Image (cartoon, rainbow, N blue to C red):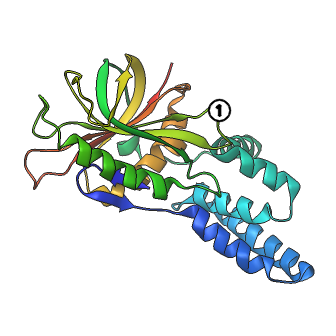
Amino acid sequence: MWFHPRHGIIKVVDRGYILEKIKGLLAKLPHPVRWVLTMVIGFILLILGIIMMVTPGPGLLFIFFGLSILALEIKWAREVNKQGMQGLEKIMAKLKSIFKWKKKTDEKVRHLLETAVFPERTLLGLSRPFISATQSNSNASEVIGPLWGEMSKLFFSMKLDRDANPVGYGAMWNDVEGEPGSMIYFAGYEIFEIPEDLGGLEVLKLRPTKYAFIEHSGPMSDLPSKITSFYTEILPASGIQRIDGIDLEVYHESDNPELPTRVIVAAPVL
């Protein structure tokens, strides 16, 4: 799910809902029939996903669906599925080392990758725990969109010393105390002075951190594919080591409504 601070939800990929529907249909079938269909559907999706890793297409998404279906009957698939995106990344790294695949990456997009130390920032917003979209029980679409709406309503009702179009931040980090795939999402806007009355909002201070990032300034409908490309292709191909920390989506909205919103997608690196 991707959310624009002013214009609402851009796209929702509710993987958990789709998977639960498929699982529900399979569960109603006799075991022999269910086993055969699970194997056929799961491996077809898995193979298609692997093929798409070297051809255009949402390869990682198909692999995720395939493993989630196979997890109904196969133990190793369940174990990989629990590991979420990290498990998928390990599998693809192993497959690429075996078959020596070298995926072609769009050079124009690849050159957009930059690194810089982002200075300290103070944000005012709201946070919520959620289950990552890499998990079959993801609730990202139910949490993040409403969170932005609730936060924006409170923020713009306050009298603050701020820009007319404040910079919006979507900050995400792992919830170490939660179940597999648990994360914290903070939706907020940059402020220059912390008000005495927070108005029900929370303060998040971002420390100076080195980030690898790309910039998106095209149609918002293209943002999901750009984010996927950043994490699964561009950043891994760069050789830059990603570290645990706070991932960011930074929304710079133009004063001119005819100009596209500029979005920076960033991950903390060494």
Residue lying at 50% horizontally and 42% vertically, measured from the top left: 231
Q: Quadrant of residue 254?
A: top left
- Dot 1, crowdedness within 10 Å: few (<14), some or many (≥20)? few
Q: Residue at x 22, y 23 (%)?
A: 196
Q: Is residue 189 above or below residue 69?
A: above
Residue 119: x %, y % from top left: 31, 18
Q: Is residue 227 left or right of residue 250?
A: right
User: In x, y percent, where is residue 262?
Assistant: 23, 43
Quadrant containing the N terminus in the rendered view: bottom left
Q: Name the residue nearer the viewer: 17 or 125.
A: 125
Residue 161 in the figure: left or right of residue 149: left
Rendered residue at 73%/48% (across/down): 82
Of the residues shown, which amino acid type is indicated by label 1?
Glu
Q: How many marks?
A: 1
Is residue 113 something one can see in this rendering?
no
Q: Which residue is mark 1?
A: 177
Q: Is residue 10 left or right of residue 153?
A: right
Give the x, y percent position of residue 169.
32, 37
**Closest to the observer, 185 or 53:** 185
Q: Residue at x 77, y 44 (%)?
A: 98
* Quadrant of the image occupied by residue 155: top left
